Image (cartoon, rainbow, N blue to C red):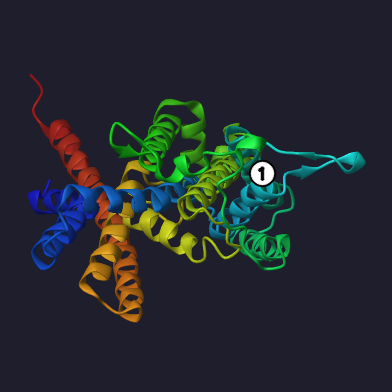
Amino acid sequence: MNQKYMLYMYLLKARTFIALLLVIAVFSVMVPNFLTTSNLLIMTQHVAITGLLAIGMTLVILTGGIDLSVGAVAGICGMVAGALLTNGLPIWGGNIIFFNVPEVILWVAIFGIIVGFINGTIVTRFGVAPFICTLGMMYVARGVALLFNDGSTYPNLNGMDALGNTGFAILGSGTVLGIYIPIWLMLAFLLLGYWITTKTPLGRYIYAIGGNESAARLAGVPGVKVKIFVYAFSGLCAALVGLIVASQLQTAHPMTGNMFEMDAIGATVLGGTALAGGRGRVSGSIIGAFVIVFLADGMVMMGVSDFWQMVIKGVVIVTAVVVDQFQQRLQNKVILLRRHEEKQAVSQGTAAPQG
């Protein structure tokens, strides 16, 4: 085997981590406070938002799908939380039920799962392309979020002691062992995503569907259930992001999550997940999220224009896709080389004199 090809393969597989190191090295030189502990914690808190979405997006893309609705779902879930904390839930007889913060989080999480379940059902049961289905859901969710309060926000989500719904700010800004709760949530979902994709039959089904859906179906893989699950999981991740952002701002805004789906897809692609499905890891997507967020935050600290930030981020994502295609072609070439060497070894063994 040509050692040059193997070296290229190792470098390509580690490209996201190398890119992260380069980003950190460049900004640590150009921005004096970039590597301070407080700044790293704040940036990692930002990573948690993109990272959570990227974990759900990774599972969807591994099946060969895509979820463009996650940003809008985060927005509508934040509005649901704001409505429950501010106005409660009206029921019959003119009565109103107010939920405490854990109950609000639970109901919003269920709402996000339901939206994802609807996406998965439309994709699988009605044969609608994931791009079109989730694009439509993006518009629906964003429109409903705007209708919730006539386009206005739900401000001051502090709750009231008399109603027992105070403490919402802890979710987005609270710390455990000096680390922000959103970071712990990202780590928990990273471990959950890793366990699902590497240690369970469901994970094998996800990769099988993305690799060759027809073959997976013939092998008995329950494709419909698996796809519905990954979209519901993505909806759950989006709901948590909506809750975190609303908690951090103490305000629910209907336009929360605008363009979040692009960052999530960008992080997933940077992390080595193939858009065609069947190849990728949630750990790579998290590293991709670090690259996206550290790059954006570093440019903000340098005072780079928002317009140039968009240009640079777009160039990075397109470059990642090009490199991914190059890696795939190189992998195919390595496979062909191995087969050729194996055939040569077999032919030489056959031609050798028999004792």
**Foreground residue among 215 and 168:** 168
As helix, strand or loop, the secondary structure at mark 1 comes to helix
**Residue 349 x %, y %:** 14, 31
**Foreground residue among 76 and 38:** 38
**Could one spot residue 13 in this view of the protein?**
no
**Residue 224 x %, y %:** 65, 40
**Residue 253 x %, y %:** 58, 61
Read off the residue under disc 1: 111
With respect to residue 139, does 228 lie above or below? above
Name the residue located 31 percent from the left edge and 73 percent from the top edge. Answer: 315
Name the residue located 20 percent from the left edge and 39 percent from the top edge. Answer: 342
Relative side of 197 to 299, left or right: right
Amino acid type shown at disc 1: Phe
Q: Which quadrant, please, contains the N terminus? A: top left
Q: Which quadrant, please, contains the C terminus? A: top left
Extreme residue toward the front, this view: 162
**Could one spot residue 320 in this view of the protein?**
yes
**Foreground residue among 83 and 239:** 83
With respect to residue 284, does 257 lie above or below? below
Relative side of 345 to 246, left or right: left
Relative side of 66 to 22, left or right: right
**Residue 336 x %, y %:** 26, 50
**Foreground residue among 206 and 189:** 189
Q: Residues within 10 Å of mark 1 (few under 14, many from 20)?
A: many
All told, the count of numbered labels is: 1
With respect to residue 83, does 104 lie above or below? above
Extreme residue toward the top, this view: 355
